[in-house]
Amino acid sequence: MNKVMLIGNVGKEPDVRYYDTDQAVAQFPLATTERGYTLQNGTKVPDHTDWHNLVVWRGLAKVVEKHVHKGDKLYVEGRIRYRSYDDQKGQRRYVTEILVENMELLNPKPIEREENALQNTAQPTTAQPIPSQQATKKQNTSPVDNITDDDKTLPF
């Protein structure tokens, strides 16, 4: 099985290219970091960061183009691929890539932008009276409060 799962930060803006009939491919680096620690004898082990070359195809590449930016935190699933090519000087170069099949954005949604968008698109409403405190208490009662002994028997 060839399966890779990574959580990391996008290293630079994705490079998105289109080919054929509106098909896209996106490429960008992802940094994963193992946090440092201190051994019992006092030796400090520093953080270790690895860089991964991600390749995203078709529809997911279009999602990357719109929503993924430098510094974003991502969770990606995919498979590892090794390939080689000859550079301009004729030297053999080796590349390791992660072919992304699934991706989740882990950044929290920016609250300010969401609130501004809601305010701009909200329809004007008429003022409505605030319900009394007693009416609010009745609405907030839990269904668990109304359970009787007969209701506690299981139907099976």
Image (cartoon, grey):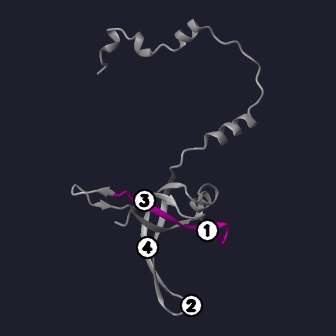
In the depicted structure, whether residue 43 falls above or below residue 150: below
| Horizontal side, residue 141 vs residue 126: left or right | left
The location of residue 103, given as percent across then percent down, is: 50, 56
- Distance between the alpha carbons at the discs numbered 3 and 4: 15 Å
**Which residue is rendered at x = 61% and y = 39% of the image?**
111
Q: Which residue is mark 4?
A: 81
Labels 4, 2: front one: 2
In the depicted structure, whether residue 98 falls above or below residue 148: below
User: Which quarter of the figure is the C terminus placed in?
Assistant: top left
Q: State the SS at label 1.
A: strand
The mark found on residue 88 in the picture is 2
Q: Which residue is mark 1?
A: 15
The image quarter containing residue 113 is: top right
Identity, as a three-letter code, of the amino acid under mark 1: Asp
- Distance between the alpha carbons at the discs numbered 2 and 1: 21 Å
Q: Which residue is mark 3?
A: 6
**Which residue is rendered at x = 48% and y = 57% of the image?**
102
Point out the stretch of residues depicted in magenta.
16-36
Labels 1, 4: front one: 1
**Mark earlier in primary sequence (4, 2):** 4
In the depicted structure, whether residue 122 falls above or below residue 26: above
| Horizontal side, residue 133 vs residue 98: left or right | right
- Distance between the alpha carbons at the discs numbered 1 and 4: 19 Å
| Horizontal side, residue 95 vs residue 67: left or right | left
User: Can residue 41 be found in the magenta stretch?
Assistant: no
Crowding around mark 2 (Cα neighbors within 10 Å: few <14, some 14 to 19, many 20+) is few
**Mark earlier in primary sequence (3, 4):** 3
User: Which quarter of the figure is the N terminus placed in?
Assistant: bottom left
The location of residue 44, given as percent across then percent down, is: 30, 60
**Mark earlier in primary sequence (2, 3):** 3
